[in-house]
Image: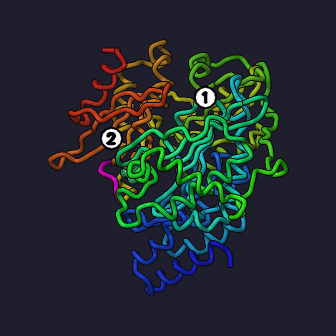
Amino acid sequence: MGYHDELIGAWADFNDKKITPLQLKAVSSNFGIYQQKDDAVMMRIRRTGGIITLADLETIAGLLAKYHVPYAHITTRQAIQLHGVAPTDVEPCLADCEAAGLRFRGGGGNTFRNVLVNPNSGLHADTAFDVLPYARALADAFYTFDTAYALPRKIKIAFADRADDRMLCAIQDLGFVAVMKDGKRCFETWLAGGIGNKPRVAFKLFDALPAEECIRVAMAVTDLFHDHGDRACRATARLRFLRAKLGEEGLTNLFKEYYAKADERGYPKCAEADLKPETYPLTTLPEGVPAAEGFENWKAVACEPLADGTFAVRLFVPFGNFTQPMLVRFCDFLRRFGLTRLQLLVSQDFVVPRIHKQCLTALYDALLREFPDFDLTLRSYVGHIPTCIGNTVCKIGAADSPRIGERLARALDAWLPADTPERQALARIVTSEVRISGCPNSCTAHPAAKFGFQCRKLGGQDVLVPFSPAKHEPPTLGEPLATPIAIEDLPHCLLANLGLL
Ligand code: SF4
């Protein structure tokens, strides 16, 4: 029986009114398939490290058309969600996804969630080694590791190929940062961090774990969490609360007991044969196209130089959302220019690595010409300030965070005219380091940002709790500041914090 069979059965029973929404949720949430506030359905498709091919995107565009799904959304965990699926379409849509190899198991609920990988792994000048093959091997091994789908709460894992992206790993239940030791691949390993209720930076479990051990360590941590996590109280169920109870030494000792049984329990090592390197095909963009107006500003914000002299280009996706016609046009664009492998970013954008310097003007020109109605080049801040999906969709949200982000973006657009050096200087910060979450669940990881904000209700009004800036070295989370601010004061607050007022 496939993993989706139980899920398909539950949806059939729900549509036949044989089970309640609560009974459905008990099965469906573990696959990242939830009823939205409007009773339509959200379906979250996993993508390890956010890697997605043109063929995957074309499949998703086909699903949007076939099932009249209003839009697809890039998530803050490098996954992609279908929003507004009719409850009666969930079963056939699932079957289509399964046929196309799109996975749901562990998309939500008390399970092993989508594995994060920092952008452009293996391609930076300061990369230790490419971690994507390890992330993929781990996700594949966990797909059939049933313990990981019956946990007290969710477990989150991330990989980074360099110390600069350590923070991504330090805010997970388990994080692996690539380091080289004595010429061997290793992972600096971080344990029991998290950013929801009572956020904490993880502590270092290993300075240099041999890289091939990462799956065994992850399985030992998962089994430990399965057996010892708090199943009585959801609010204190995450691994970081077990750390609070046992202390770092106590949790480390408990981990060692489980890890010592790795052979006995059959935890696999990362086999060299399973470590398939990521390859990015050459594009067919023309070279030497004259630079259109605004090119240098766009290049400064959207293009990151890579170790081999090429560039990784960030394609900004307004609100992280694609309607079906827009996704079809985007796929057509990607196909014509040979851009067949992309990575989803936690900022809800795409990045396309390995674009030759001589082709950047052609790419910019084509993006401007072909998408005048879809701002992939950051002409405006609207839709490009990272927020979670907010309370119009999410049942537990306190406020409409995307609309709060939009309001801030419009104010910044008005304050900083296009193509000014000030706007360019601010753009990277605004599109990556400003984050707004709709509730304390912190889906944008705002405590790990320089300028984090959390929505809450105060006296029936929406307000924002500003957080102090996070620090990267050593990883230190921002703290909520005592006085919440009104939504309309957000632009002033941000500009003042940036020292621009
Ligand atoms: S932060 Fe809160 S409101 Fe936003 S998506 Fe997460 S749970 Fe929902």
> Which quadrant of the figure contains the N terminus?
bottom right
In the picture, measured across the screen, residue 432 lies left or right of residue 129, that is left
Looking at the picture, how far across and down is residue 183, in whole percent? 79, 29
Alpha-carbon span between mark 1 and mark 2 = 27 Å
Which of the 4 quarters of the picture holds residue 236? bottom left
Give the magenta part as a residue range. 396-400
Q: Tag 1: Cα neighbours inside 10 Å, few (<14), some, or many (≥20)?
A: some
Identity of the residue furthest to the top in this view: 421
How would you classify the magenta stretch by its main secondary structure?
loop
Looking at the picture, how far across and down is residue 255, in whole percent? 56, 52
- Say above or below: 364 vs 171: above
Residue for point 56% across, 41% down? 205
Which of the 4 quarters of the picture holds residue 189? top right
Tell me if residue 390 can be seen.
no
Label 1 or label 2, whichever comes before in sequence order = 1
Looking at the picture, how far across and down is residue 163, in whole percent? 61, 28
Residue under pointer 1: 163
In the picture, measured across the screen, residue 348 lies left or right of residue 448, that is right
Residue under pointer 2: 454
> Which quadrant of the figure contains the C terminus?
top left
Three-letter code, disc 1: Ala
Q: Tag 2: Cα neighbours inside 10 Å, few (<14), some, or many (≥20)?
A: many
Looking at the picture, how far across and down is residue 131, in whole percent? 70, 40
In the picture, measured across the screen, residue 12 lies left or right of residue 307, that is left
Q: Nearer the viewer, residue 179 or 333?
A: 179
Q: Nearer the viewer, residue 295 or 53?
A: 53
**What is the secondary structure assignment of the residue under circle 1?**
helix
- Say above or below: 421 vs 221: above
C-beta proximity under 8 Å, tags 1 and 2: no
